[in-house]
Image: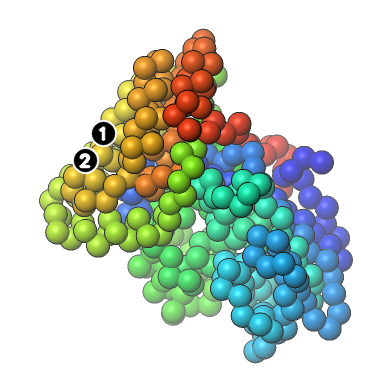
């Protein structure tokens, strides 16, 4: 079965959300209106719902070795025993069910099963955005279970509101990639404004509003572009790294503002190069974005490009690629872009010698007929 297809009836529903990787615009994208490019990859997290009667359950081997029972208290799903690992799942359920209640839907009990391909077989995290993917998958599965249209903007907004309810400091670009799929040009919204709306307005009204600075556009990559993804084997915490940068930026306001403006200009040029199908121009901006991120390290003292990521990039550059860290850096993945005529075997061999794992991932874009 195509991973983006699902079966839906009054009794069951299923949805799969892909993982993500950032191509450009990291850190700056946390600020409203600052652009990034992010992709969905063909590793998936799947949420399945089956109708129940007196109680519900949540089961995922990633979070617990047994199903965890839940009940509704004051119209809100609550676990009978606490499990902090399920905070994103519960936030997704609570926000989506609140929207459903406000739009006149009667709620039922169900068993939710979650299955993830986003980590290695040994449980190590690749940095593919499992918290974003699980939120998107649960939101979309719930909408299908209750026979609501699960259009991408609605799924994205409900997922973003779920993360906001947990106090997230991220940009939510991972949510955009998992909801829309493919190559996505993304700018984050004004979170201060949307949080204020959450305090003042019914949730369904917040969803219907135009969110300031939000921009989500699917891009068509040049046909002659090759993407290679390498994993350093060192997991990193996006939340911690973004928090460190935010804490340090106040000490060098002018330099940080300059970084933001240069990142915006760089990613805007890169997006234009995508539209023009100009691979050398895309590569040029990838290299410039890498430089900007290394300058951000000088501004904040936060290490974004680790020695392993430097090796990954330098090997790719030596063979005609343009490479940089992906996402928050500090470990996890790096990306390299090549023209399609490039022989990648020397890169793969040298990465392996440097203990860098090439992840055999492709960009995932769902069918245009998918709803």
Q: Nearer the viewer, residue 187 or 59?
A: 59
Q: How many marks?
A: 2
Q: Which colour style is shown?
A: rainbow
The quadrant in which residue 76 appears is bottom right
Q: Quadrant of the N terminus?
A: top right
46 lies left or right of 213: right
Q: Residue 45: x and y, percent? A: 67, 52
- Mark 1 element type: helix
Query: Are the two marked residues, 1 and 2, in contact with CB atoms closer than 8 angstroms?
Result: yes
Determine if residue 278 is in view: no
Please say if 318 is above or below 179.
above
Left/right of residue 199 with respect to residue 141 in the rendered view:
left
Q: Which residue is mark 1?
A: 291
Instruction: Identify the residue shown where x is 50% and y is 47%.
Output: 127
Disc assigned to residue 163: none
Q: Which residue is mark 2?
A: 295
On the image, the x and y values in percent for residue 35 come to: 37, 43
For the residue carrying disc 1, how many other residues have a C-alpha within 10 Å: few (<14), some (14-19), or many (20+)? few
Placement of 61 over or under 219, stated as above or below? below
Q: Residue at x 62, y 46 (%)?
A: 120
Which residue is at 64% across, 38% downward?
A: 42
- Provide residue 170's location: percent of width, then percent of height: 41, 58
Residue at mark 1 to residue at mark 2: CA–CA distance: 6 Å
* Image quadrant in which you'd find residue 144: bottom right
Q: Residues within 10 Å of mark 2 (few under 14, many from 20)?
A: some
* Residue 109 appears in the figure: yes
Indicate left or right for 24 with 360 as reference.
left
Name above or below for residue 281 compared with residue 306: above
- Would you say 10 lies left or right of 147 here? right
Circle 2 SS class? helix
């Amino acid at each position: 079965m195509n991973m983006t297809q699902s079966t839906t009836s009054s009794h069951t529903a299923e949805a799969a959300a892909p993982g993500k990787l950032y191509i450009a615009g990291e850190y700056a994208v946390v600020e409203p209106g600052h652009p990034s490019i992010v992709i969905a990859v063909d590793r998936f997290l799947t949420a399945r719902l089956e109708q129940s009667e007196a109680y519900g359950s949540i089961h995922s081997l990633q979070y617990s070795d047994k199903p965890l029972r839940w009940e509704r208290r004051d119209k809100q799903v609550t676990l009978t025993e606490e499990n902090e690992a399920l905070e994103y799942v519960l936030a997704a359920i609570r926000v989506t069910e609140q929207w459903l209640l406000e739009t006149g839907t009667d709620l039922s009990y169900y068993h939710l099963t979650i299955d993830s391909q986003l980590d290695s077989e040994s449980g190590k995290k690749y940095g593919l955005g499992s918290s974003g993917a699980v939120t998107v998958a649960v939101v979309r599965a719930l909408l299908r279970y209750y026979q609501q249209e699960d259009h991408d903007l609605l799924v994205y907004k409900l997922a973003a509101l779920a993360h906001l309810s947990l106090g997230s400091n991220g940009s939510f670009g991972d949510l955009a990639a998992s909801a829309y799929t493919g190559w996505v040009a993304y700018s984050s919204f004004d979170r201060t404004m949307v949080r204020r709306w959450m305090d003042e307005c019914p949730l369904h009204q917040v969803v219907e509003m135009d969110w300031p600075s939000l921009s989500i556009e699917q891009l068509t990559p040049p046909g002659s572009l090759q993407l290679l993804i390498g994993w350093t084997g060192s997991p990193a915490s996006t939340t911690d790294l973004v928090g460190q940068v935010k804490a340090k930026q106040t000490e060098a306001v002018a330099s940080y503002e300059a970084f933001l403006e240069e990142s915006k200009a760089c990613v805007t040029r890169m997006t234009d190069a995508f539209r023009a199908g100009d691979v050398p121009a895309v590569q040029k901006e990838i290299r410039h974005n890498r430089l900007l991120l290394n300058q951000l390290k000088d501004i904040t003292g936060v290490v974004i490009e680790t020695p392993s990521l430097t090796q990954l990039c330098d090997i790719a550059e030596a063979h005609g690629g343009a490479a940089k860290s992906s996402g928050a850096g500090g470990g996890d993945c790096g990306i390299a872009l090549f023209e399609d005529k490039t022989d990648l075997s020397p890169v793969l061999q040298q990465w392996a010698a440097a203990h860098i794992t090439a992840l055999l991932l492709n960009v995932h874009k769902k069918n245009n007929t998918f709803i």
